[in-house]
Image: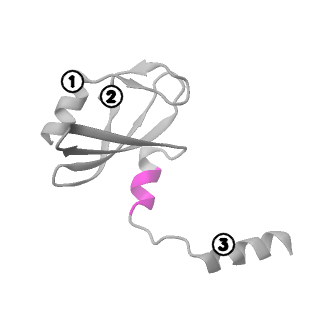
Amino acid sequence: MSIILNKLKKETVIYCPLCNKEYAPSNLQVVEQAGETILAHSHCPVCAGAVLSLLYKDFMGITLLGLVTDLSYDDTMRFKDTEAVDEEEVLNLYETLFN
């Protein structure tokens, strides 16, 4: 496991963007890692809200960018390598639903 992730799990407190409660990121699970850049999934133990976080080391230290999601860790792992939905697929779905 990377130095960034170990440091984050031991020394950081995260505030949930949904319920604003703080929690330790001990449940942080790595989705993908490339060098010192990590895509991780965590969930708030209070409200069960989930966050996908991009963690990377730059000249200012460790940066964390988070995105609120309704995906579980298992969902994230299942979808991470699938192809993106294109415009044609969206239009076909719309036509199927509303025509």
* Magenta region, main secondary structure: helix
What count of labels does the image hold? 3
Question: Is residue 79 a member of the stretch shown in magenta?
Answer: yes
Q: Give me the C-alpha separation between circle 1 and circle 2.
A: 8 Å
User: Disc 3 or 2, which lies upstream in sequence?
Assistant: 2
Disc 1 target residue: 10
Q: What residue type is labelled 3?
A: Val
Q: Circle 3 is placed at which residue position?
A: 90
Depicted 66 relative to depicted 48: above or below: below
- Element type where label 3 sits in the image: helix
Q: Position of 19 compared to 66: left or right? A: right
Residue 88 lies within the magenta run? no
User: Which amino acid type corresponds to the residue marked 1 in the rendered image?
Assistant: Lys
Alpha-carbon neighbours of circle 1 within 10 Å: few (<14), some, or many (≥20)?
Answer: few
Tell whether label 1 touches label 3 (CB within 8 Å).
no
Q: How far separated are the C-alphas under marks 3 and 1? A: 43 Å
Secondary structure state at the residue bearing disc 1: helix
The answer to which image quadrant residue 82 occupies is bottom left
Q: What segment is highlighted magenta in the picture? A: 75-80
Counting residues from the start of the chain, the first of labels 3 and 1 encountered is: 1
